Image (spheres, coloured by chain):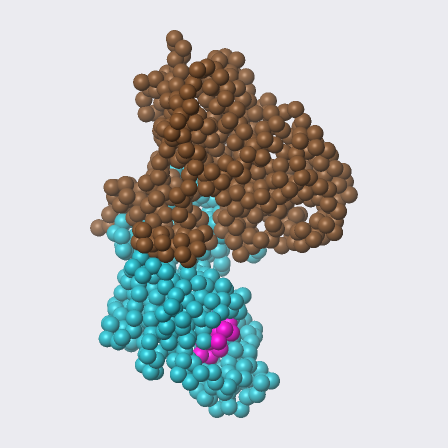
């Protein structure tokens, strides 16, 4: 059995930032366990730019953004094990992992940061009828083939879902000489960032068809075409709008699912909306000493926010390791009108600092107000020209307000139309 | 070179028959039209070992089902294939259905089915608390089980090849001539000569039969659609739950799988002869499965679906298995018309077909080096920590996880490719190792499996296919 103060599961942007922050706060023995061959996580295949505008105030590609953190980690004594898969975490914070070199590893951790990221929703979860031809893949898999392996996964492409990876891949495939025929989105709005719709679709004249889905795939060997159809207000396909589109590739960008299998095995409480752990403002889960951050906690729109969240988790883990448990009085955060979820789900009012609440809305709002209400009083409100499910929003509970709260207090975030 | 026997079709019947024949000193060849074994009805069915109360007494189905179900645990143990004796329940969801359950019980007795019992409502609900409130009784058949049909077929083929059977994939029989007591099979890999043929061609078995002038039966391709649900709901029921047939159809089953998922289905839709290989799912079929599965278990939700699929069953117009020498040519032996309970019957059918052949040939020696055990299969996810440590020490590739969802290592994937009659494509690796079978459906490991296949087979990444033929995954290199 090995002993570490902090075990970080996952060496993507979240894991790296959490490990660095914990180190900076004075934690001695930190180890990062990463399943891929290198640190960096999904950023390694995101060769487009647009990363770092918020955090570094400069525009970077995914690998450039990751490299900044990898360089910092190399300057520390943080132990990094790549090509290493965590198999289990038990209730005593013992982490079991495996790799080719060490075989099975058992590590007793004082604290653990979960930073496993997320996966893409596959075809099977969508109930698309039809054949099982090749050429149906998630946008992220296609991205890996093009950007890391250097192969074209298709020539005539239909994309289902307008998540950011799908939008990015529409542009990427076009630049590589493929014909992207259409992006279909089931909902009446896109789940992606506005900037991606403009820069990846509009700039290349790729049509985005809202309230439209793929109802069937055709072709026995390689995909030969798909049938698309508009959907009604219950999201059911309208028979009369069915249309056949010839294509050899169907890319799916229909949602990301936090990878919480390890989390669930520990028995940590999961938020049914985010599919991530229930956490407090330092990103501590309901299992003492286990923290979570990044896309394993909730799917983020920008990596910059992942970094900031991971730093909180790193700081929280460091505090737990160095000072033990703090006094806690938890108040839950409650979603009001129009708000789908809030992270953190609960706030320790004994925390002496400002607490930022991240949230997403459930639909498009125009000229609406974001309101933070504590104990029935509006603490803060902000006018927004547009609120969209694809973009994360935030409000701050100031430290002095927190100080005045009690265990019976209420925290509500809502949208006022 | 003239073979003693050519088996046409490497489904569960062909593969197990090949293994039975490998007990004898015979030149046996197993021919498969597709790029891998188990690509027809074997790939996509209910994966149930039926107890044997369904078929009418006196039919071949009844006889072979009961015998096959009895043999299955031992065959699976020899071949290191997971089998689970979970028992089955035919639920009665109304008073009228109770009468049907009673009828099945009596039929089971006539067929010689062991360990059956009629359960009342409270006994049923104690066994299966997640059944619908309407469930008011059931037939429990404790001898029923579950098995993975393609894993059984892969294992049987591997074992047959180890024991001397030749296996040819992508070898479609397109015509048969017979002269001087010898068949010439015209195949996509050239002509093959053989003294005997065993027809295990599944949904195409009538077409193959026609090639020797036997038109005694016709296969009606019957499509069945299914959902596989996530392991998170795999324990919703512990028994295989059947429904009584109604005017609306035979009913939809809800069953755990040996791998811990939940399986719901199938529909039963007869399709055109021209669509024998069209295993597509349909919106109507999938809707039907969802609707009827809820009759047994209201909590079943396809929100947990990880995939859906359809299989084509070889329904013979004569309504029973067609086994034994053909009337048109005594050296042409039928193992045809195998539909449910074909998987359950397979071990018994294989022994029967092998015996028919050996008797026909007469003086056949035993294969002295025959070893029916297939034991050295390492499965990381089932191994203890000590076994894992030892395996990694032996071969570090067992320490590299490729498929996260199903915890499959690089070593297991390499084994699957290098095995006798091993994997040649991504789906072949998936069926042998479960890499890509999990909840992400190959999103992460798919590209890694392509890399390992290319490396092992000495090919480029864009040579690798999903399931052979033109099912390519990648096109040219990027600019």
- Rendering quarter of residue A73: bottom left
Q: Position of residue B174 (x, y in %)?
A: 39, 21
Please give the range of residues in magenta: A274-288
In the image, is residue A245 above or below residue B383? Answer: above
> Chain A, which colour?
cyan
**In terms of depth relative to the viewer, which is nearer, B349 or A225?**
B349
Q: Which chain is brown?
A: B
Instruction: Classify residue B252 as left or right of residue A356.
Output: right
Total marks drawn?
0
Residue lying farthest to the left in this orientation = B479
Q: Quadrant of the N terminus of chain A?
A: bottom left
Q: Image quadrant of residue A354?
A: bottom left
Q: Which residue is at 39% across, 83% downward?
A: A322
Horizontal side of residue B85 vs A263, given as left or right: right
Relative image position of residue B157 (x, y in whole percent):
41, 33
Q: Main secondary structure of the magenta part?
A: loop
Q: Is residue A279 magenta?
A: yes
């Amino acid at each position: 059995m090995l002993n570490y103060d902090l075990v970080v599961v996952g060496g993507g942007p979240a894991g790296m930032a959490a490990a660095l922050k914990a180190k900076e706060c004075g934690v001695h023995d930190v180890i990062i366990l990463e399943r891929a061959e290198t640190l960096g996580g999904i950023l390694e295949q995101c060769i487009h730019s647009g990363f770092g505008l918020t955090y570094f105030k400069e525009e970077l590609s995914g690998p450039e953004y990751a490299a900044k953190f990898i360089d910092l980690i190399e300057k520390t004594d943080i132990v990094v094990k790549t090509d290493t898969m965590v198999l289990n975490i038990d209730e005593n914070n013992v982490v079991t992992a495996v790799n080719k070199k060490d075989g099975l590893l058992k590590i007793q951790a004082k604290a653990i940061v979960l930073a496993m990221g997320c996966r893409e929703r596959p075809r099977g979860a969508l109930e698309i009828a039809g054949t099982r031809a090749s050429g149906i893949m998630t946008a992220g898999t296609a991205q890996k083939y093009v950007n890391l392996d250097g192969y074209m996964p298709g020539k005539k492409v239909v994309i289902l879902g307008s998540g950011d990876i799908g939008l990015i891949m529409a542009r990427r495939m076009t630049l590589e000489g493929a014909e992207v025929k259409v992006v279909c989105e089931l909902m009446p709005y896109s789940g992606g960032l506005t900037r991606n719709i403009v820069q990846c679709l509009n700039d290349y004249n790729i049509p985005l068809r809202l309230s439209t889905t793929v109802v069937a795939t055709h072709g026995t060997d390689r995909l030969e075409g798909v049938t698309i159809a508009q959907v009604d207000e219950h999201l059911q396909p309208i028979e009369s709008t069915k249309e056949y589109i010839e294509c050899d590739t169907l890319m799916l960008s229909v949602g990301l699912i936090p990878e919480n299998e390890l989390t669930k095995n520990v028995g940590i409480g999961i938020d049914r909306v985010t599919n991530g752990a229930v956490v407090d403002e330092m990103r501590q889960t309901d299992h003492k000493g286990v923290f979570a951050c990044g896309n394993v906690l909730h799917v983020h729109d920008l990596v910059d926010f992942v970094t900031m969240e991971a730093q909180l988790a790193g700081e929280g883990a460091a505090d737990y390791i160095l000072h033990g448990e703090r006094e806690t009085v938890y108040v839950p955060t409650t979603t009001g009108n129009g708000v789908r979820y809030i992270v953190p789900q609960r706030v320790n009012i004994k925390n002496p600092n400002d607490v930022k609440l991240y949230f997403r809305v459930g639909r498009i709002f125009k000229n609406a107000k974001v309101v933070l209400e504590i104990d029935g009083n509006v603490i803060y409100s902000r006018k927004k020209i547009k609120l969209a499910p694809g973009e994360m929003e935030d409000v701050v509970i100031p430290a002095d307000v927190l100080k005045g709260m009690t265990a019976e207090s209420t925290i509500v975030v809502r949208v006022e139309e | 070179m003239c073979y003693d026997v050519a088996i046409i079709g490497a489904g569960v019947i062909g593969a197990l028959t090949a293994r039975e024949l490998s007990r004898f000193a015979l030149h046996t060849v197993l021919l498969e039209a597709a790029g891998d074994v188990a690509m027809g009805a074997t790939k996509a069915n209910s994966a149930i070992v039926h107890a044997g109360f369904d078929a009418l007494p006196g039919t071949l189905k009844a006889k072979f089902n009961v015998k096959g179900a009895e043999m299955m645990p031992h065959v699976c143990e020899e071949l290191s294939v997971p089998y689970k004796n979970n028992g089955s329940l035919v639920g009665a969801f109304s008073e009228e259905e109770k009468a049907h359950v009673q009828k099945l019980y009596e039929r089971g007795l006539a067929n010689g089915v062991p360990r059956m019992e009629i359960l009342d409502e409270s006994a049923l609900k104690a066994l299966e608390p997640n059944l619908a409130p309407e469930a008011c009784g059931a037939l429990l058949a404790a001898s029923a089980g579950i098995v993975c049909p393609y894993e059984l077929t892969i294992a049987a083929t591997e074992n047959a090849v180890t024991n001397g059977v030749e296996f040819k994939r992508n070898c479609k029989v397109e015509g048969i001539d017979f002269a001087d007591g010898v068949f010439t099979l015209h195949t996509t890999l050239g002509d093959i000569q053989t003294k005997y043929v065993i027809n295990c061609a599944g949904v195409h078995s009538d077409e193959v039969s026609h090639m020797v002038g036997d038109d005694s039966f016709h296969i009606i391709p019957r499509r069945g659609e299914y959902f596989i649900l996530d392991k998170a709901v795999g324990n919703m029921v512990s028994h295989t739950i059947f429904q009584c047939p109604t005017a609306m159809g035979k009913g939809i089953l809800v069953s755990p799988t040996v791998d811990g998922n939940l399986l719901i289905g199938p529909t039963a839709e007869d399709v055109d002869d021209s669509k024998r290989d069209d295993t597509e799912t349909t919106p109507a079929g999938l809707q039907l499965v969802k609707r009827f599965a809820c009759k047994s278990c209201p909590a079943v939700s396809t929100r947990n679906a990880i995939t859906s699929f359809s299989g084509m069953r070889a329904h013979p117009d004569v309504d029973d298995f067609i086994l034994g020498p053909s009337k048109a040519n005594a050296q042409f032996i039928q193992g045809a018309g195998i539909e449910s309970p074909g998987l359950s019957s397979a071990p018994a059918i294989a022994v029967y077909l092998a015996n028919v052949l050996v008797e026909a040939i007469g003086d056949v020696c035993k294969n002295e080096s025959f070893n029916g055990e297939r034991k050295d299969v390492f499965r990381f996810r089932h191994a203890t920590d000590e076994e894992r440590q030892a395996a990694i020490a032996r071969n570090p590739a067992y320490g590299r996880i490729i498929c996260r969802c199903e915890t499959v290592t690089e070593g297991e994937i390499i084994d699957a490719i290098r095995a006798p009659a091993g994997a040649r494509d991504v789906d072949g690796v998936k069926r042998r190792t479960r890499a890509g079978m999990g909840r992400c459906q190959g999103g992460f490991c798919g590209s890694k499996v392509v890399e390992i296949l290319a490396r092992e087979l000495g090919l480029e990444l864009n040579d690798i296919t999903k399931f052979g033929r033109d099912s390519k995954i990648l096109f040219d290199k990027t600019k």
